[in-house]
Image (cartoon, helix red, strand yellow):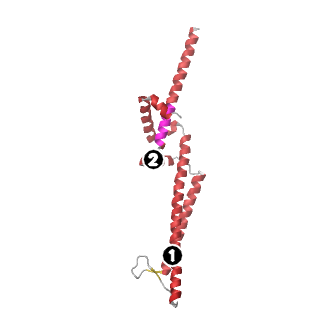
Amino acid sequence: MKKLSLYIFLVVMFCSVSFANDQAKKLIENCTDQTYIGRYDYSEESHEARKRIINYHIETDPYVKSYESMVAFYELELVRERKLLKAFKKKYLDYSKNTLYGQIRRPEGLSEDESVEWVNKKANEYVSFINAINKLRREKVENEALLHEAKYLSGLGEFKKMSLEDKIKDNEYYSFFSQCESAYKKNPIAFKTRYKK
């Protein structure tokens, strides 16, 4: 009977030590994940953390694909509008008068009133080209920001699915893991309180 109780005691001790090690490992992993992922702010450190996570994104993620196609669409539209503007400038603007932006050429054979009306019409066309290009630029920048965010969220999802063994292969993650492990050894109670999920 004494041997049986000794065996039970040893099994219970082994299980509790194993559980404590697994719990400590999970706490250290939580600390490392938080450090590796970073805070969501505008600091340089946060920017670097976001770039690390984006590296894990999935190319076939539907959100990433949709924003990539939108960015490509706006890029093509910008190229098209710039070509139209260039053709417009070549046809209607005169740069020989030492003006920075050129002057609209007046067609021959029109009365003064018709000429002024024609120039105003062409000036409005020119402004509409500029406005269209500026709008396309804004749309492209907005979609690039959304693409960046989609890649981040895709990468974050993939990163969270990874096992500790896969994460630790990354040198930076390994470095953060070592720092968190040292912090755990220095003050385990505070560490448990802070990184318990």
Q: Residue at x 52, y 72 (%)?
A: 129
* SS class, disc 2: helix
| SS of the residue under disc 1 | helix
Is 9 one of the magenta-colored residues? no
Q: Position of residue 55 (x, y in %)?
A: 50, 48
Q: Which residue, given by chain and number where applicable, does mark 1 sit on?
A: 126
Q: Is residue 6 above or below residue 51?
A: above
- Give the quarter of the figure containing the N terminus: top right
Q: Position of residue 25 (x, y in %)?
A: 50, 31
Q: Quickly name the residue at label 2.
A: 46
In the image shown, does 190 or 3 lie closer to the viewer? 190
Three-letter code, disc 1: Tyr
Q: Is residue 3 left or right of residue 186?
A: right
Image quarter where the C terminus lies is top right
- Asked whether the residues under the numbered discs 2 and 1 touch, taking CB atoms below 8 Å apart as contact, a structural biologist would say no
Crowdedness near tag 1: few (<14), some (14–19) or many (≥20) residues, C-alpha within 10 Å: some
Q: Position of residue 86 (x, y in %)?
A: 49, 74
Residue occupying image coordinates x 42% and y 49%:
44
Q: Which mark is residue 103?
A: none
- Residue drawn 52% across the image and 70% down it: 131
User: Crowding at label 2, few (<14), some or many (≥20) Cα neighbours within 10 Å?
Assistant: some
Q: Amino acid at mark 2?
A: Ser
Name of the residue lying farthest toward the right: 62
First of labels 2, 1 by sequence position = 2
Magenta part, dominant SS:
helix
Q: Position of residue 32 (x, y in %)?
A: 47, 38
